[in-house]
Amino acid sequence: MSDNAPLIVAIEGGGTKFVCGIGTDPHNILDTARIDTTTPHDTLENVSHWISKMKVAHGPIAAIGIGTFGPVDLNRDSETYGYITTTPKPHWQQTDVVTFFKNRFKVPVGFDTDVNAAVLAEYLWGAGQGMDPLIYITVGTGVGGGVLVNGQLLHGLLHPEIGHLIVPPPHNSLAIQREGQCPFHRSCVEGYVCGPSIAKRWGVKADALPPDHPAWEEVADVMGYALMNLTLTLAPKRIILGGGVMEQPHLIPLIQGKLMQHMNGYLSVPQLSHDIERFIVKPGLGGRSGLLGSMALGRMAIANKAL
Amino acid sequence: MSDNAPLIVAIEGGGTKFVCGIGTDPHNILDTARIDTTTPHDTLENVSHWISKMKVAHGPIAAIGIGTFGPVDLNRDSETYGYITTTPKPHWQQTDVVTFFKNRFKVPVGFDTDVNAAVLAEYLWGAGQGMDPLIYITVGTGVGGGVLVNGQLLHGLLHPEIGHLIVPPPHNSLAIQREGQCPFHRSCVEGYVCGPSIAKRWGVKADALPPDHPAWEEVADVMGYALMNLTLTLAPKRIILGGGVMEQPHLIPLIQGKLMQHMNGYLSVPQLSHDIERFIVKPGLGGRSGLLGSMALGRMAIANKAL
């Protein structure tokens, strides 16, 4: 902690709440707030009001970092850079987030997906230090993933949309609704394993299912296929699994087993055999990855360069 | 062309032949050779003999670049860096390629997979210029892929192994052998769409199947799923499809259609609708991507840095 370190506002924009923080680094967070996600206008105004209060309390801010639900436009040459774009969330389509905060506070604004923010924080301070390529996946009300590769967050045509990876359907499913629940895809990861999909397919909320319920083996099966495809594509050095569904303590070992079973010995590396517990891991920052990653995005906006 | 440009030996190591070239850049290749792939000892000695002849004819060489079949060890901190490792190809397991050429010729040796070499060449001089992330996939006797992302080739735990991506099995297949033909995986891309898999599943060699044969729709279906998963993971700006099977002129349009059908409108970008013909393309360098990419690997070995 240094009195001279620049003061950053971090905003983790989620579907139900915007989590905000102000500080200089993960060990020096001066204040936090949770603001309900309502309409874009009211939500952004409420966040803005909180930032103004923080400036009075703590002094001038150097930058704002925002990690938000998506899809978002991260192409700096695009007219809609900094927008939340085609989200199914009511009212939020084509919301210009970056310009709002830039105009209001006249400071650099860093912007990315919530999951890219999370992978960045885990790389800098959490369970992914020194691990490049690194993947962070959240399984909760939806499934999303962030990727850091060759020292930078992964953008391109858009950004990773790992929740919609196509996998084989679970074998001989015992679910009430055997089919995947995604409105776009018959057989994608999110349609089988996000919280609402589990609830619809088994008729019971995910957190009410006992650890020996067959739903969990299916979740692990599908996640095992997703991690297999990610491993074969990105050759990650580590994959971090976060989000509400992953808080079931028995789930990560089940997924590790399924990943090895699906790979069937194809790649002979310790990470896919005796070292799998260090390959597929929980977040090192608990639920704070998104907020701390947003702080890192703010820092990077000051430097205006990659890591 | 410059008389002062460093002279590079490029080696594309394949399962049936090693294609070698010597020159300074793609427009100045002075000589080429094809050397049968037999045992590692004989093959590397024959390549070495050819290089020695070339030095007599053209003068001293500055570097050697090698793109080879894999899996290979690309981790510079590993004791087996520069090896072809667990390949199923008889005799070639644990073959130290880099040390052989370094000791013999005392020049920097660049080393990567054949498909990473190909993606590099297409990025520098072919159909992928300015496109980062970029993917190159070859569909021939096997299926492999190279990836360039954030300005560098993708390495990590290992390197991409795109041929073994898991996909849903083709729906209501009419094939004689409905199941995938990969010895490791029940339902992976290579097990359905590489040349030998097509021949086994349909009882006819791929290049003897007429364009309206149902096999092609299945190949396109499986490739469409593979490209969907790659798009959702790497967010590539372009995907290049090469290799013998892709020389069927009707196949790329079929695959473009299947990719859009599988995505089902999930990402609203022109590359997945009216611009798909510029998103999924043929190689710009024809069959020369691997050799020219190996030359680029040699150049990079001189600079000892990324692109």
Image (cartoon, coloured by chain):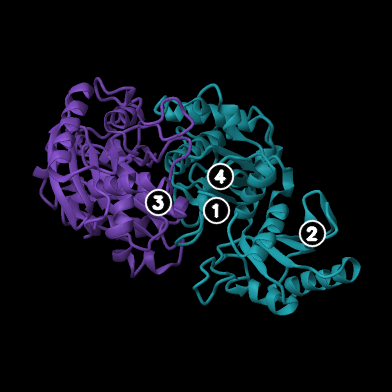
Chain colours: A purple, B cyan
* Residue A283 image point, x, y percent: 24, 55
Q: Residue at x 23, y 46 (%)?
A: A291
Callout 1 secondary element: strand
For residue A234, side relative to residue A254 (left or right): right
Callout 2 secondary element: loop
For disc 3, the marked residue is A148
Q: Are marks 2 and 3 in contact (CB under 8 Å)?
A: no
For disc 1, the marked residue is B152
Q: Quadrant of the N terminus of chain A?
A: bottom left
Tell me the chain of label 2: B
| Tag nearer the camera, 4 or 3 | 3
For disc 2, the marked residue is B5
Q: Residues within 10 Å of mark 1 (few under 14, many from 20)?
A: some
Tell me the chain of label 1: B
* Residue A123 image point, x, y percent: 33, 57
Q: How far is mark 1 from mark 3, CA to CA? A: 13 Å
Q: How far is mark 4 from mark 3, CA to CA? A: 17 Å
| Tag nearer the camera, 2 or 3 | 2
The amino acid at mark 2 is Ala
For disc 4, the marked residue is B135
* Residue A130 image point, x, y percent: 37, 63
Q: Residues within 10 Å of mark 3 (few under 14, many from 20)?
A: many
| Tag nearer the camera, 2 or 1 | 2
Is the residue at mark 2 from the same chain as the one at mark 1? yes
Is the residue at mark 4 from the same chain as the one at mark 3? no
Looking at the image, which residue sits at the far bottom? B103
Q: How far is mark 2 from mark 3, CA to CA? A: 36 Å
